Amino acid sequence: MALDFARRQDILPWLEKMRDELSLPILYVTHSADEVARLADHLVLLDAGRAAAAGPVVEVLSAIETPVAVGEDLGTGGRQLS
């Protein structure tokens, strides 16, 4: 289900609280590097349906081989963050 920006902003604090208080593993699929930086501790970067990179968020987002700018929507280039 795709949510508009306002609904995502309503839901993100709830997801953060659930993550922090319940320590539940969460699989979150997004094209938003901002949301990944906010919610994730581990990232799998998909390119054409294949894992192009995986690891701690800071390492994957800062890797030279997989440049990703926080604030960038990655939905148009074939890459998908999950």
Image (cartoon, rainbow, N blue to C red):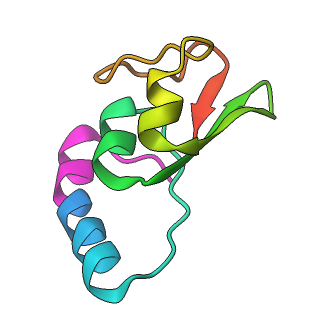
Asked whether 19 or 30 is in front, the reply is 19
The picture places residue 52, in percent across and down from the top left corner, at: 74, 28
Q: On the image, which quarter does residue 44 sit in?
A: top right
Q: What type of secondary structure mainly makes up the magenta span?
A: helix
The picture places residue 19, in percent across and down from the top left corner, at: 34, 74
Asked whether 4 or 14 is in front, the reply is 14
Q: On the image, which quarter does residue 22 sit in?
A: bottom left
The picture places residue 16, in percent across and down from the top left corner, at: 26, 66
Q: Is residue 33 above or below residue 24?
A: above
Residue at screen point 33% across, 41% down:
37
Q: Report the span colored magenta.
A: 1-10
- Asked if residue 79 is among those painted magenta in the image, a careful observer would answer no
The picture places residue 50, in percent across and down from the top left corner, at: 82, 33
Residue at screen point 53% across, 32% down:
60
Task: Give the left or right position of residue 9, taking residue 50 as reference.
Answer: left
Task: Give the left or right position of residue 76, taking residue 49 as reference.
Answer: left
Residue at screen point 46% across, 42% down:
57
Residue at screen point 17% across, 58% down:
10
What residue occupies the far bottom of the structure in this picture? Answer: 22
